Amino acid sequence: FGSTGPKTEFHPSASLRVYAPFWKVWWKEILCIIASIASFIAIVIVLASYDNHNLPTWRFKITLNTFLAFFTTLAKGAFMLPVSLAFSQSKFTWFLKPNPLYDFYILDQASRGWLGSLKLLFRVRFKHTVTIGAILMIVSNLSSPVTQLAISYPLRNNTASEEEAKMFTIDEITLGHNYARKLAETASLKATLPDNGDYEVPAPPQKALCSTGNCDFGPYQSLGVCVKTANITSKLLTKPISNLTLDLFEDGNGGLIPGLKEWNVSLSGKYGMLHQSPLTVISGELEGADTFGYSNNTRLLKARLLFYFLIYTSPLSPSKTQNLPADSDAIDDVIDSITEFKYEAREVLFHICVQTFKTRVRAGLDETSISDTVSQIDDPSNGIVLGRKCTKEVCQPLEEPGDLVAQITPPNAGPRKFSASYATMWNMAMGISILLNGKAELRITPNETLNHFWFSSFPRAWYRDVTYSNKNVFNPPRREIHLNNFLLNIATSVSSDLRYTHGQDGRPGAVVIDGTPLKEVSYLHIIWGVDILHRRRVCCSSNLPYHRHCRTEHGISRNRTGKCLRPGGRKGFRFGNSCRPQQRLPRSLERWSAAGRYSSEDFEEITSHATTERT
């Protein structure tokens, strides 16, 4: 290696001697490249066939990750063999002209791993095709983790046919009279118990039966109870108090207290209240066919269950110099802060209707919305207005319902007919009205003690939780929202109990709507852009032997394109079109030229012609 003797003269060969064809010289490398390409194709085919599909279930518990790891490793190992051999080939072809012996070491290190390949790239600087192999050696270390990044396993909902998803609906109310009255009364009472944030939002409709916790339902319709509210404050009359009798003054039972100021307000002089507190509410049912806000809607009137009125005081906000009461303030502090108030009145109509719902269940939570409501009967001439006339002992329908039926046909109902008998509607109205009539008032007596009273559960709940909670006393918009949600909860509760009772008991008129049960499953998603690195690696490795295979003509290496490669010193080969003889190869090199490779016996003779150039 350190010889300083005279250089051996090379003389051009007399003729071009090529004995071995290309495929015989490189058959092992070709097989490896074919195996690498086949592995890559297998990976692409399998991933493409399962992309956006459920994960495969293979025999012997083989998973997709196992398959991918095996074939990625196979492709990597198969393509690295020709790259490594190409480096070994370069170690000999590099010394067709005397070059630094250090280059031999660099090429040898490049064939061993990515660190040596980095050294080769630094020395050659992308001026020779050997850099392709160096780049492939470096990239191969990134192929496996990058390939794994191309695969993700997101979740999605798939149909679970063996599970259950159903919703109860009704197109006819077939309960007995007493049962209908009891159901309406119980459902209304439940609605007065706030369980959803103090009436900030309305209570949800009936929940679906969904065994998986994830279900979808198409639009469906059901008969139920709806509510409308009309502002009738303009109908109120305020009259001076006159003709007070002794029986109006009672001790603690709702009567007037001597020494306190009295107020009197009414609707048309018929429905009103006499009170002594700035916080008072009264509710009652309208008699007969009386109505203040719906007199022009005959079809709606004949679908009614009952009308009732609400009259309540609305305290005016204190002046800016006065502090508003906080949530923690005592009720007497709240009353003391009230200096003025005004009256408000509402007419509330409960009626039968057909509602169109949209329901989806996600993670066990129902999301139901009402997309449409139809509340007018088909033929008003066949209906009646369910008014009432009452004596001290009993209340009777204004008109005898008999066998009359209220029928509602919404658009897109198909063959379904929605109806309810007026007799059943009357009994439902009686159940609801039991809770709606009453009065609530809070007063401070002359001896500075609190005196409050209420009749029935509805005024108590409305007074305490809706109208005069500390947050609502001086906030009319918020009070209006809570009031509407409170009334809507009553209608929703009655409708849900009707649907559930009919469906659970299998009564006539019950219709079960089947939904689509869903189950969360993992599926395969491929990011195809990530596999570009692997594709380019395979393509480059398949072309590398062609760049490394050069036939020898008069001591000059020629590649497959016909261009000559000349040794170019430290920085690589020079390319040219002329192939004039430069120097003769030793016999060992000529033997390699004939066989296509150097043999191990030729190494000593080759290195004897390598000179060490030092700067």
Image: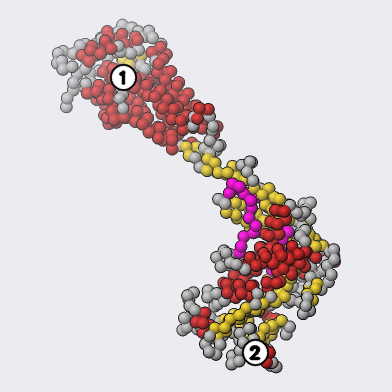
| Image x and y of residue 535, in percent | 44, 30
Q: Residue at x 70, y 57 (%)?
A: 501
Specify the amino acid type for callout 2: Phe
C-alpha gap between disc 1 and disc 2:
117 Å
| Residue that badge 1 annotates | 88
Q: Residue at x 80, y 65 (%)?
A: 423
Secondary element under disc 2, as helix, strand or loop, is loop
Please state, as top left, top right, bottom left or bottom right, where the C terminus lies in the image: top left
Of circles 1 and 2, the one toward us is 2
Q: Residues within 10 Å of mark 1 (few under 14, many from 20)?
A: some
Does the segment drawn in magenta span residue 207? yes
Could you tell whether 123 is left or right of 403 in the image?
A: left
| Depicted 112 relative to depicted 246: above or below | above
| Residue that badge 2 annotates | 249
Q: Nearer the viewer, residue 255 or 89?
A: 255
The quadrant in which residue 93 appears is: top left
Please state, as top left, top right, bottom left or bottom right, where the N terminus lies in the image: top left
